[in-house]
Amino acid sequence: MTATMPNSKPTLSKVNAWLARLMIAGVCLCAVLCATGLVLSLIRGVPRATLKPFKGVAEGFTTPSGVWASATRLEPTGLMALGVLVLIATPVARVAFSLVAFSLERDRLYVVITSIVLALLASGMFFGLVD
Amino acid sequence: MTPLVFAALVFAGSVAAGCLGALTGLGGGVVVISMLVLGFGVDLRYAIGASLVAVIATSTGSAAAYVREGYTNTRLAMLLEVATAAGAITGAYVAGFLRSDVIVYVFAAVLFWSAWNAMREPVASPTAAQDQTPDPLATRLNLDSSYPTPKGLQTYRVRNVPGAFVVMLLAGVLSAVVGIGSGVFKVLAMDRLMHLPFKVSTTTSNFMIGVTAAASAGVYLHRGQLEPTLCAPVALGAMAGALIGTKILAKAKVPWLRVVFAITIAVSGVQMVIRAFQGNV
């Protein structure tokens, strides 16, 4: 953006248009993965998970690496879980993108504010995995 | 119930949740928890995980439209996200030490208090920015903005930033304990404390709740509360519903939106209390 327009800052509406595109991309990817996984599981007749009492998800689905491993084997549950992870990652990606946008606007105050949000999100993810 | 029927019903219910969530700024987590616990007998911990997914799906699905159309105040959202994200991480830990029935009572109390609040008329209806003196802190933070109305762009001023910040911190804690984005608190803080136009409050809340929910999602993933076979139809339904909701919001009248907001949370509160009294939580 700045390479072609060296003297003009990206306007808020332009930044917002990119934010919107990013969110649409996240939603679409999630929808494709979830729908594919769901349809495959129905075709293959995977039995319904017992949802009471609480036992926790099947082994391997509590970490991103486990989900990825299952999804790359094209297991229906793995594809659905990956779709859910993509969905969770989208708001985080949106905050990261905002950080870039505010830096391009040279809005120092909001670069700081956005960095704090990103750091909090990262620590939430991190502590979630070592909890 | 066959897996196909189950997935179809959960999907349909989530469409309604996503649509209501996008309209009210609540994210629809309330509806998803009620539907799964009361309608399908799902354990509350799985339901909370699924509602977290529904909230992110509704937030992301509707935010794309709201940001593009200019309803969302993205600066204000980022500022308040500092408070909600910090609160959410704290709350995710507190929730692990609480009993399900305690969570349900906290949940219901919040819903009733909020419904009562939403039905009251705003103390001071938002007026055009020219009629108000600028708030020094809001000016420093570059928060004043405008939003689309049938009569064209309407400017508005932001005030009482510190008060809203504190409420957002509590909102973050509660959202993680209860498993909803706690859009309830976000909408009320912006509507009641900051006197923002209702559609700005709900759409900015919608934008924020995805981030708040994502902040505690790591903890829920690790605890095994995100059951993929349940979360997938919920996510698909909520995203579809959110898209429908964004189409309705642009045309909707504000008093009608307030009533929908209040009814949604009050009905959910009643259902939760009934369930808690039966001891089936």
Image (cartoon, helix red, strand yellow):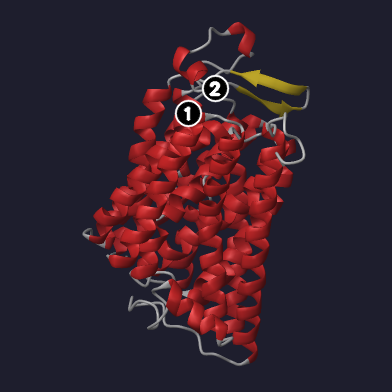
Question: Which image quarter is the C terminus of chain A in?
Answer: bottom left
Q: Type of residue at label 2?
A: Asn
Q: Kindly identify which chain the residue marked by label 2 belongs to.
A: B
Question: Which image quarter is the N terminus of chain A in?
Answer: top right
Count the numbered circles shown.
Answer: 2
Q: Residues within 10 Å of mark 2 (few under 14, many from 20)?
A: some
Q: Residues within 10 Å of mark 1 (few under 14, many from 20)?
A: few
Contact? badges 2 and 1 (CB < 8 Å): yes
Q: Marks 2 and 1, how far apart in space?
A: 10 Å
Write down the residue under mark 1: A109
In the image, residue B275 above or below residue A101:
below
Which residue is at a point 42% across and 56% down the rendered structure image? B271
Q: Secondary structure at mark 2?
A: loop
Residue B115 appears anywhere in the view: no
Q: Type of residue at label 1?
A: Leu
Q: Residue furthest bottom?
A: A44
Write down the residue under mark 2: B142
x and y percent of residue B10 in the render? 57, 69
x and y percent of residue A78 in the render? 52, 80
- Quadrant position of residue B102: bottom left
